[in-house]
């Protein structure tokens, strides 16, 4: 539901991922991390929900 | 609905005289037209303050939180659902309450009336489905359906879900309305449009937290926005902080919101933040077949585990 609401507000579906990995599932962990990094790289740097630092003159 | 007033005064007087309750929570006339205010009646002779008309949109369940007295409370459909939620969340006990059910035909939206009239509004009266607005410039009449709050016009629970007494016979429920049409319209947009839509929607927010204070669900002793150790979200009007506030506040209401409209009604700048809670209501209905506050016997959707809970978001 949280992911749905974020997407409803315009956050890219590939930006946020959920997974359930046991401490014994090291291979699954690597797989998931690789998949996520590939997907996130594909959509590029996040522009949304980013707070710009105050500009100091 | 203004015909309820006399019965309400009698009921409140009787309950107080019989010492069944220590106080009755209802509405009295506010200092300005269309601004009825909640009132707590403790003496039988004060029961004549009570009124009822189409300007009682505030959710009275908000005034029950953590009270220990025996309480009589007037409850529209939405109020009664929030009372159920309060009982489920142990914010008040069922046996403390005498719920006086008020079948509701919808509340009027003061902004729609203000937008459709000119000059200061001096008096608003209603007779059945006709609303008469007296301004400095003259008199204007509206059909109630034209000026109703949006959540009321798509409401499907007008009659109280729990009650010990009823003020009048139940009203027919609306069946031919689509409560989630506005959510579907946003779902149909692409991501860019949605992001821009919410930028526009939330832009006027001044972070006054009136929406939070009017909401019966927002009873945390310290709200996450007020905490400073750690500070979860910035306190200024930075667009991202505003968005974070609205996003998280809505999410805290997931599976609990009854779309009573108190938040939007309380907002001084008229932001329809109900879109966010409605999206969650829609998801709750679709994913868990859950609508908040309909039964005292069922645990809320996000509070219980079922083997068939959707989990396709987990990779």
Image (cartoon, rainbow, N blue to C red):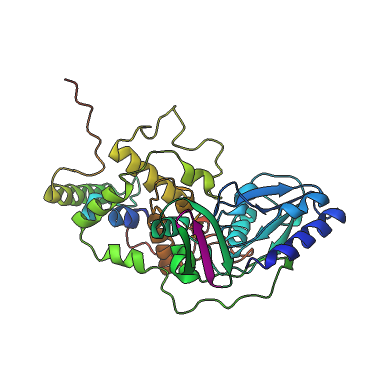
> Residue B113 location, x and y as percent?
44, 59
Q: Is residue B287 above or below residue B137?
A: below
**Quadrant of the snapshot with the N terminus of chain B:** bottom right
Residue nearest the viewer, comparing B270 with A47? B270
Q: Quadrant of residue A23?
A: top left
The answer to if B40 sits in the magenta stretch is no
> Residue B71 location, x and y as percent?
74, 52
Question: Image point 30% across, 35% down: which residue?
Answer: B238
> Residue B189 location, x and y as percent?
23, 62
SS majority, magenta: strand
Question: Image point 26% across, 48% down: which residue?
Answer: A29
Residue nearest the viewer, comparing B234 with B298? B234
For the record, the magenta segment spans B129-137
Residue nearest the viewer, comparing A3 with B227? B227
Q: In the image as oriented, which residue stretches furthest toward the front?
A: B137
Q: Is residue B16 visible?
A: yes
Question: Image point 39% across, 52% down: which residue?
Answer: B273
> Residue B294 location, x and y as percent?
58, 66
Q: In the image as oriented, which residue stretches furthest toward the top?
A: A57
Q: Is residue A8 above or below residue B171?
A: above
């Amino acid at each position: 539901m949280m992911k749905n609401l974020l997407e409803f507000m315009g956050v890219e579906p590939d930006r946020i991922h959920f997974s359930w990995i046991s401490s014994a599932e090291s291979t699954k962990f690597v797989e998931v991390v690789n998949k996520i990094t590939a997907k996130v790289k594909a959509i590029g740097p996040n522009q949304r929900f980013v707070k710009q630092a105050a500009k100091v003159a | 609905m203004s015909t309820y007033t006399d019965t309400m005064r009698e009921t409140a007087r009787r309950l107080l005289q019989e010492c069944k309750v220590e106080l009755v929570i209802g509405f009295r006339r506010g200092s300005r037209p269309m601004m009825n205010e909640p009132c707590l009646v403790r003496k039988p002779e004060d029961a004549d303050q009570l009124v009822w008309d189409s300007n009682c949109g505030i959710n009275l369940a908000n005034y029950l939180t953590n009270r220990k007295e025996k309480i009589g409370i007037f409850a529209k459909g939405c109020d009664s659902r929030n009372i159920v939620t309060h009982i489920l969340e142990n914010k008040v006990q069922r046996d403390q309450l005498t719920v006086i059910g008020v079948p509701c035909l919808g509340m009027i939206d003061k902004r729609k009336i203000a937008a459709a009239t000119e000059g200061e509004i001096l008096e608003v009266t209603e007779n059945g489905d006709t609303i008469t607005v007296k301004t400095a410039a003259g008199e204007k009449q509206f059909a109630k359906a034209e000026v109703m709050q949006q959540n009321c016009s798509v409401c499907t629970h007008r009659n109280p879900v729990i009650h010990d007494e009823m003020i009048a016979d139940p009203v027919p429920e609306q069946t031919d309305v689509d409560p989630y049409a506005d959510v579907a319209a946003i779902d149909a947009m692409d991501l860019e449009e949605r992001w821009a839509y919410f930028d526009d929607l939330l832009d006027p927010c001044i972070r006054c937290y009136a929406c939070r204070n009017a909401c019966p669900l927002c009873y945390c002793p310290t709200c996450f926005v007020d905490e400073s150790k750690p500070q979860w979200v910035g306190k200024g009007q930075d667009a991202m902080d505003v968005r974070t506030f609205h996003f998280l506040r809505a999410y805290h209401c997931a599976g609990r919101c009854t779309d009573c409209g108190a938040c939007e009604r309380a907002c001084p700048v008229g932001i329809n933040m109900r879109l966010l809670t409605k999206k969650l209501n829609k998801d709750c209905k679709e994913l868990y077949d859950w609508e908040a506050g309909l039964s005292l016997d069922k645990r809320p959707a996000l509070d219980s585990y079922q083997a068939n809970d959707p989990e396709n978001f987990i990779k």
